[in-house]
Amino acid sequence: MKDSRPAEEGVAIRRRRQCAACGARFTTFERVQLRELTVLKASGRRAPFDREKLFRSIQIATRKRGVDPEAIERIVATIIRRLEALGETEVPSRTIGEFAMTALKEVDDVAYVRYASVYRNFSEAKDFQAFLGSMESE
């Protein structure tokens, strides 16, 4: 038995399925992938884009902030659409980070600061102070 419906603003199909052998129900998501994306790291190394890694990093930033898991899925889907809209097969990691920060800023300020602290490699309290000061001036 299958129950299908659009998900992630029409970018994916969500299917509820049932195992014929044991009867357990589970959900799958089918997404259209326009092209394989490669991430160009700051070190110059190249790696395949990993949707789950992006999802996990945003999930960690939003942990205990009351952000709905479906909102995280929408953020990730939006970032991926923006990356695909660039029309490039290689995307600098800093572009992905900036897109994630922009999306998080719209959802939750604390998650935005958390993500920025890792992405921009904050090492001291004054790094947070400078960042928070720049947020207030915006």
Image (cartoon, grey):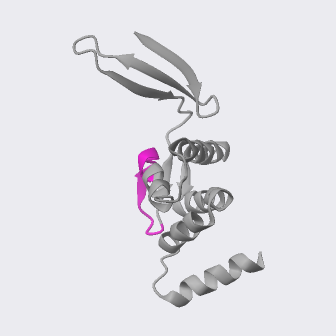
Instruction: Please say whether residue 51 is one of the residues in the magenta stretch.
Output: yes
Residue, far left: 21
Whether residue 125 is situated above or below residue 42 in the rendered picture: below
Q: Position of residue 69 (x, y in %)?
A: 50, 44
Q: Position of residue 20 (x, y in %)?
A: 27, 10
Query: Looking at the rendering, in which quadrant would you find the N terminus?
Result: top left
Q: Which residues are magenta?
A: 42-53
Q: Position of residue 17 (x, y in %)?
A: 39, 18
Whether residue 84 is situated above or below residue 113 in the rendered picture: above
Q: Nearer the viewer, residue 83 or 55?
A: 55
Query: Would residue 50 be found to the left or right of residue 112 on screen?
Result: left
Q: Nearer the viewer, residue 8 or 94?
A: 8
Residue at 52% over, 66% down? 115
Whether residue 85 is situated above or below residue 39 in the rendered picture: above
Query: Would residue 132 be found to the left or right of residue 125 on screen?
Result: right
Query: Looking at the rendering, in which quadrant would you find the C terminus?
Result: bottom right
Q: How many labels sit on residues?
A: 0
Q: Nearer the viewer, residue 70 or 46?
A: 70
Residue at 77% over, 80% down? 137
Instruction: Please say whether residue 38 is one of the residues in the magenta stretch.
Output: no
Residue at 54% over, 42% down? 73
Q: Position of residue 126 (x, y in %)?
A: 55, 90
**Quadrant position of residue 91:** bottom right
Residue at 49% over, 80% down? 122
